[in-house]
Amino acid sequence: MGKYAANLRKLNDHVWAIIGDDGATNFGIVRGEDASALLIDSDIRRMDEIDEALKRTECSKVRYLLNTHENFDHSSANDYFEKNGAIVVGSDGCWDALKSDGEAKFTEMAGRSPELKTRFPGLKMGTLQVTFSQSLTLHLPGVDVRALYSAHNGKSHSRGDSIAVLEREGILFAGDLLYTDFHPVTVYGDIPNWIKSIDYLLSENYAYVVPGHGPVSQGPEGHQRACEKFRAYLEDFHNRLTEIKAGRKTPGEIESYMKSGAYASMGKTWMVKRNIEFFLGEGK
C-alpha cells in the first residue's frame, strides 16, 4: 500500500476508469448529476488512488459500490465504504463466495500488508447489502448502470463474475472476465466456462471496454480484438494444460511456451507457473 497518483482514463463526461499500474486492478467511477458516484470494484490497499480519483472527478460521495467478483483486489474495501454510507452490491455468486471462504482469504491477503491495521482500525471483510441472481440496474441521477451475472455455469474466472454495462453510453466494465496485455489469474475458475463468458462479451459491441487488468479497449473493433485475443489465449492455455495432463509435455515446456511467441510481450509472467502448478495440484 502506498500513495500513488491515480491513472484516470476519462471515457465520457461522467464515466472514468482508474487504470492500475503494471497490470494492477482497474476500477470504475460513474458520477450522477447530483455528484454521487457508483464505484466499480475497490482495493483497500489503494485507497489513496481511489480517494484522489473521486476528488478529481468531483464526486461528493459513493452511493453504490459494485463488486464484479469476490477477489481481495476487487472487494477488500467493502467494509470501508459501507461504514461511509455506500450500498455494496454484487451477485449471489459473489455473496456465496465471500460467505464461504472470503474471511480466510481476506485475513491472508490483509496480513501481507500489516500497515492496514494501523490505517484502518477494526478493518474486516465486508460482504454485500444487495445481491442479484441475474441482473440489476443501479440508478444515479441522469445515468443507469446495469450489472449482469456472467459466470457461466456458476464459475468462469470466479464464482461471482459480473459485468457492468452503461448501455446508452456503450461502455462495458468487464471485471476479470477480460485481461488485456497481462497473464490472467486462472486458479479460481474454470477455463472452458470462462471461454463461454467471453463468447457472450463478443456478442455485443461497445465504445469502450474496461478489463479487470490491462489497457482499455476503444471502439467496436478494439473491443472485438481484445476479446478474441484473450479468448484465444484461454483456449490455447487450456489445450496446453491438457497436454501436460496427458504426459505429452512437461510443465516447464508449457511455461516456456506461454512466455514466448505471441505471448512474449505480456506482463505478469510469474502467473503462468502459478496457474500451471494449481491446475496440476487440483487435478483439474
Image (cartoon, grey):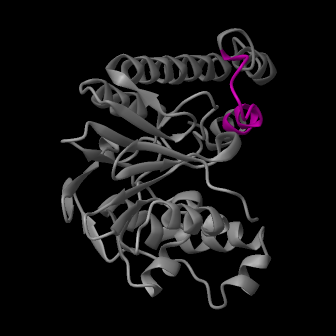
**Residue 116 at what x, y percent from top left?**
72, 78
**Residue 71 at what x, y percent from top left?**
54, 58
Question: What residue is shown at x 48% (from left), y 74% (from top)?
Answer: 78
Question: What residue is shown at x 34% (from left), y 40% (from top)?
Answer: 172
Question: What residue is shown at x 31% (from left), y 44% (from top)?
Answer: 150
* Depicted 14 relative to depicted 76: above or below: above
Left or right for 274, reference 235: right
Give the residues drawn in magenta, as a range.
263-275
Who is closer to the viewer here, 151 or 178? 178
* Depicted 52 relative to depicted 222: above or below: below
Who is closer to the viewer here, 84 or 242? 84
**Residue 238 at what x, y percent from top left?**
54, 23
Left or right for 230, reference 62: right
Left or right for 236, reference 33: right
Residue 276 belongs to the span the image colors magenta:
no
Instruction: Tell me the quarter of the image containing the C terminus.
Output: top right
